[in-house]
Image (spheres, rainbow, N blue to C red):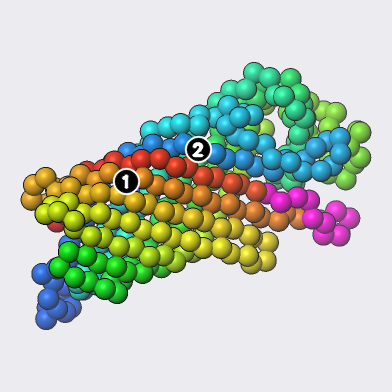
Amino acid sequence: MIRSFFCIVLLIFGTRAALAETDLSTDSSTDNYTLDIGIFYANSDSNFIATSPKTGGTFPIDFEDELLLAEEQYLPYFEFTFSFNQRHSIYIDWKSLDRKADTETVSQDFILEDIDGKDYLIETGSKLSTELNIDILRIGYGYDIWQGTHYAVGVSVGLHAMFIETAFKGTIGICVPDSSLSSLCTNTVATPEVVDETLTAPLPDIGVYGSYEFYPGWTFDAHAQYFALKYDDVDGSLVDVRLGVEAKFCDNWSLKLAYNYYDVDVTIKKTRNVGNIEQRTFDYNINYSFTGPMFAVSYVF
């Protein structure tokens, strides 16, 4: 994912250079690039939907409480912005949240349905190793509607793309989809990475942003982005809010401190063919949110 991030940055650089060569008459005195490198503190909350082998109903499994994934982390953060023609900007940022934990004793039975066409049973008392890796890529375009000597207010359109990988290792029962639950999950195996699921969730967004220089060299920045989408088998929503202060300490260099709230909920309806009849199995749901401060060093060139 890091490689993809820098490839996109290089693409923006190349596009900017081509535009400069083909339109020498454009005033580029206000054009600049900004690179932020920093860390953020994530207080995470994530879950997925599993099936009860006793009732057939669904219920959420919490990655942090039930499967012991770390709730608090310090994680890397990158953001690149290209500002041009006074009012326009293109931005891209990336966050990575990789976690892994071992659960000595699972506290409840649950079934993971329709993973590679199979169902898997995890029983009470089993030892389970869980991995959840989430990369979040945000890319978009902003336009300043109002500008002044010390302030700017604008709107943005963009895309949040989440790349989600989940893996479960341990003693897990293999189930036959078209059998009754009483005889379904009798075969137990202990293999590495019995269940490995990858999900990509692209969600477009619209938002507003603003900045205000309240003291020479000190600027208050904020943005808020939101979107909800329901189309065919995908149902998702996201909220992204950030409030922060930027302090310029020398030419081209600044320090940024912000507070971020991010919440995304993605549900994908899953179906499979049983006896040439398409049947709905369950909703694959990932809910993820984190809140916490962010710190970055910023360079303008």
**Residue at the spot 34% in from the left edge and 63% down from the top edge:** 209
Left/right placement of residue 65 relative to residue 77 reads right
The magenta stretch is: 273-284
Place of residue 276 in the rendered image (x, y in percent of width and height, measured from the top left): 86, 59
Q: Is 8 drawn above or below residue 36 in the view shown?
A: below
Q: Nearer the viewer, mark 1 or mark 2?
A: 1
**Residue at the spot 17% in from the left edge and 51% down from the top edge:** 218
Q: Where is residue 169, by image quadrant?
A: top right
Left/right placement of residue 231 relative to residue 256 reads right
Left/right placement of residue 235 relative to residue 248 reads right
Discs 1, 2 touching: Cβ within 8 Å: no
Q: Is 50 drawn above or below residue 130 in the view shown?
A: below
Q: Secondary structure at mark 1?
A: strand
Q: Which mark is residue 44?
A: 2
Quote the CA–CA distance across marks 1 and 2: 17 Å
Q: Where is residue 151, by image quadrant?
A: bottom left
Q: Where is residue 47, by image quadrant?
A: top right
Secondary structure character of the magenta stretch overall: strand
Q: Which mark is residue 258?
A: 1
